[in-house]
Amino acid sequence: MLKEAAPSQRLGRPALSFQPLGLEQIPQVRRYLKGWPYRTCDATIGGIFMWRDYFSAEFAVEEDTLYFKTNYLDHETAFTPPLGPDRRLGYERITAYCLEKGLPVRFCTVPVEELEILQEVFGKDRLDMHAERDWSDYLYNSADMACFAGRRFSGQRNNMHKFEKACPNWRFEIIQPENLAAARDFFLAYEGQYAKESDLAREEARKVLEVLEHYEAYGMLGGMLLGEDEVIGMSMGEIIADTLYVHIEKASRRYPGSYQMLVNQFAKAFVTPQVAYVNREEDVGDEGLRTSKLSYHPVALLDKYTVEIR
């Protein structure tokens, strides 16, 4: 178990050196993500870089381990679990940094399975932890999203039929360099009609435009739902290991069933035999989003914890 006294002397290394996170770090960060053993969206390119400014994220790399320092939720300094071959040592390095800087030892976005490692490192009686329900990820069976089969999904199929009736000439296109401008024009029009005023929503809008502007750097997979020559909706995400992560999902409400069709077509376009799950991220406490995400019958809610070491 980690001793509270002077861990930096025991580790024999200088404190971690954190730097601001920018898009130029995407290739460097990407190589660490394949080793993350969980399916939470926080260890993805979209999850990290689209929210880097909102959470004031900084990064450090030491001995093949990637660290992130953030201002989490209540604007308090917190660290995400380290990404590297020895997370136990990574937690010790973070603790040494906190003690040297006079910071509380606090971790955020900790998957429930990772709590066991924290207990091994610090001792169970030293962990003050609570789940952040608003930030739990919704995980779905990929075949469910691509097929909407069975009685459970009769509502989704009915809405898709309504969409097909309202927009009989619809089609789905993969986002590529030649239609990026159309995707951007759609999103600007969408924001003009449906924009929300919260800080979270405004930051998301800024980063959607950033993704479209730096689409190649982000390495996103994307698709657009069209009727005639009008863009009706768009989705963007990424695949890591056996999971398709949906980072952006926007559709016009003028057409009933547009969201159900978009969810289905995006999954059909990008789910492969190797992709078993679709992570549609959190509801951030929005009751409408919560109701919608639950209606697609998740196979799991991936709870994440904030943990402070006493």
Image (cartoon, grey):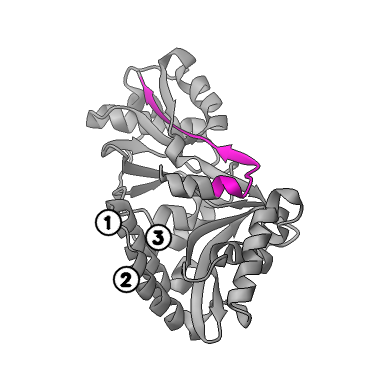
Q: Residues within 10 Å of mark 3 (few under 14, many from 20)?
A: few
Say which label, 2 or 3, has the lower sequence index: 3
Q: Which residue is drawn at the image coordinates 32% and 52% (left, top)?
A: 200
The percent position of residue 268, horizontal first and vertical second, equals 68, 66
Callout 1: helix, strand or loop? loop
Q: Which residue is drawn at the image coordinates 32% and 49% (left, top)?
A: 58
| Residue matched to label 2 | 192
Q: Amino acid at mark 3?
A: Gln
Callout 2: helix, strand or loop? helix
The percent position of residue 241, horizontal first and vertical second, equals 64, 53
| Relative depth, front residue between 22 and 270 | 270
Q: Amino acid at mark 1?
A: Glu
Say which label, 1 or 2, has the lower sequence index: 2
| Relative depth, front residue between 245 and 257 | 257
Please report contact status of discs 2 and 3: CB closer than 8 Å, yes or no.
no
* 44 sits left or right of 147 in the view: left
**Taking 93 as reference, is 10 above or below it?**
above
Label 2 vs label 3, nearer the camera: 2
Task: Find residue 197 and name its label.
Answer: 1
Task: Find residue 25 and name its label.
Answer: 3
Label 1 vs label 3, nearer the camera: 1
